[in-house]
Image (cartoon, rainbow, N blue to C red):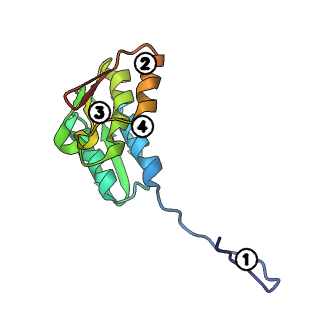
């Protein structure tokens, strides 16, 4: 493991700006589907995965504004089906299943890449939905909840 050793006896002082985290931003962006109210998220990193998530939100019916790391999402009217052509680009896109289920009472999301589920983290999502009483089906490359 790398270490940083500071010698000298002088107190350290200063400030740094912490950038946003993709792994935090993606579920937060997905959660904006739960409300009709505008949601403003600061320090959203400018990465392909965050762009894909914003595309998914737009395809689901949300309005998205982005400027200088600040994203505002208004999901006044949303549909419950996420399209394959956008979902296939990012595994984390299954994160919209829960918010869509909560908001629309149903959700259909294509499996990323059209792949078989197997032993992947998505199994935990599906087991969680079933434990909460939802009926989960995998049909033709889609997860329907």
The answer to which of marks 4 and 3 sits earlier in the sequence is 3
Nearest to viewer (mark 1 / mark 2) = 2
**Vertical side of 132 occupied by 60: above or below:** below
Whether residue 42 is visible here, answered yes or no, is: no
The answer to which of marks 1 and 4 sits earlier in the sequence is 1
The answer to which of marks 1 and 3 sits earlier in the sequence is 1
Q: Please state which of residues 66 and 87 is positioned toward the viewer in this rendering.
A: 87
The answer to which of marks 2 and 4 sits earlier in the sequence is 4
The answer to which of marks 2 and 3 sits earlier in the sequence is 3
Q: Counting other residues with Cα less than 10 Å from the Cα at mark 4, is it few (<14), some (14-19), or many (20 or more)?
A: few
The answer to which of marks 1 and 2 sits earlier in the sequence is 1
Disc number placed over residue 119 in the picture, else none: 4
The residue pinned by badge 2 equals: 130
- Give the Cα distance between marks 2 and 3: 26 Å
Q: Are marks 4 and 3 in contact (CB under 8 Å)?
A: no
Nearest to viewer (mark 4 / mark 3) = 4
User: Residue drawn 43% across and 41% down?
Assistant: 28
Residue 38 relative to residue 17: left or right: left
Nearest to viewer (mark 2 / mark 3) = 2
- Give the Cα distance between marks 1 and 4: 47 Å
Disc number placed over residue 12 in the picture, else none: 1
Q: Position of residue 30 (x, y in %)?
A: 37, 38
Which structural element holds mark 4?
loop
Q: Position of residue 139 (x, y in %)?
A: 22, 24
User: Residue drawn 57% across and 69% down?
Assistant: 16
Residue farthest along the left direction in this orientation: 85
- Give the Cα distance between marks 1 and 2: 52 Å
Disc number placed over residue 75 in the picture, else none: 3
């Amino acid at each position: 493991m790398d270490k940083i050793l500071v010698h000298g006896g002088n107190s350290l002082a200063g400030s740094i700006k912490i950038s946003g985290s993709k792994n935090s931003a993606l579920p937060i962006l997905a959660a904006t589907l739960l409300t009709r109210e505008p949601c403003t998220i600061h320090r959203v990193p400018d990465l392909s995965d965050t762009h894909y998530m914003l595309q998914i939100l737009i395809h689901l019916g949300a309005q998205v504004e982005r400027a200088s790391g600040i994203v505002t999402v208004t999901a006044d009217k949303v549909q419950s089906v996420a399209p394959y052509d956008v979902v296939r680009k990012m595994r984390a896109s299954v994160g919209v299943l829960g918010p869509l289920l909560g908001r629309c009472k149903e959700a259909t999301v294509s499996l990323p890449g059209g792949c078989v589920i197997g032993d992947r983290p998505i199994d935990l999502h599906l087991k969680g939905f079933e434990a909460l009483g939802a009926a989960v089906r995998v049909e033709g490359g889609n997860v329907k909840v």
